[in-house]
Structures are given as structure tokens and as C-alpha cells.
Amino acid sequence: MNLNTASRDVLRSLAAGILQNSDAGIQPPSLANNGFEVFVSDDNVSMPRKIRQLIADLEKHGFVNRGGKGSHRNFLHPSGVRITLSGAPGDDAKHYQERDLKRAIQKIQS
């Protein structure tokens, strides 16, 4: 977990605790007795997947890790589709890595 993720989680939990607390002494003046009910929900917040999850998806669909240099891993499917993932297994996956994974799986399924 990087510092930004940890900070975001701490701030989110603090905000949830303050907003859900009915004690007017704890709530900020801007929220106290304003007539509005505040909801904090994690339903629409999606955490990025980890590189290890992307690797598991690739292996589940028949891709083979052909090795790589440094943090890069080259995967090859028997049908000839290739994809390269970079990053440590515990790193958050970037949006383009998720996109590339989706495209590679779609290629082998069609």
C-alpha cells in the first residue's frame, strides 16, 4: 500500500466517523443542524486491483509467463496473443494495464 492509498483510506474513515456521529460537538459547524442528512457510501468507490490479480487472471485464461527484465513480465498465450505487465505484485494496477488485460482476453475469446 502506498502513502496516497493509506492517506485516502484514513481520510475516508475519518470522514465517515465524523459524518455518521450524531454528537453535535464532534461534527463540523458546516454540517451541524443544516437540515440535510449525509450518507457516506463506498459503493461507487472502486479500489484499483493489484498486479498479482491481473497475473492470476492471465494465468487463468491460459497465458504463460515467459519471463522479463526487472519488474516486467511477458505473457504469451498459445494462440499467439502477447501482453507485458510491469510492476511489483503488490502494486496497484494502472488503468492502461487493466485495459490491455481486457483486450488480450477478448482477443483469445474471439
Image (spheres, rainbow, N blue to C red):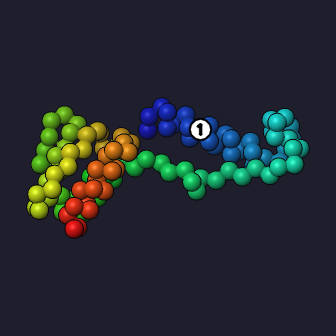
Pick whichever, 105 or 92, lies toward us: 105
Q: Is residue 84 left or right of residue 21?
A: left
In the picture, the quarter occupied by the C terminus is: bottom left
Query: Vertical placement of 5 versus 77: above or below?
Result: above
Query: Vertical placement of 28 versus 64: above or below?
Result: above
The reply to whether residue 108 is in sight is yes
Task: Please report the residue visible at 59 percent of the width from the left and 38 percent of the height from the top.
Answer: 10
The residue that disc 1 covers is 10
The quadrant holding residue 70 is top left
Query: Vertical placement of 24 versus 54: above or below?
Result: above
Secondary structure, mark 1, is helix
In the picture, the quarter occupied by the N terminus is: top left
Task: Please report the residue visible at 20 percent of the width from the left and 64 percent of the height from the top.
Answer: 108
Residue type for callout 1: Val
Percent from the top left, x then y, of residue 11? 62, 37
Query: Vertical placement of 71 versus 108: above or below?
Result: above
The reply to whether residue 64 is in sight is no
Q: Is residue 24 left or right of residue 59?
A: right
Pick whichever, 82 or 61, lies toward us: 82
Percent from the top left, x then y, of residue 36? 82, 49
Task: Please report the residue visible at 86 percent of the width from the left and 37 percent of the height from the top.
Answer: 25
Q: Residues within 10 Å of mark 1 (few under 14, many from 20)?
A: few
Task: Please report the residue visible at 72 percent of the width from the left and 52 percent of the height from the top.
Answer: 39
Query: Which residue is situated farthest in the bottom direction here?
Result: 110
Percent from the top left, x then y, of residue 46? 50, 51
Percent from the top left, x then y, of residue 96? 33, 44
Count of labels shown? 1
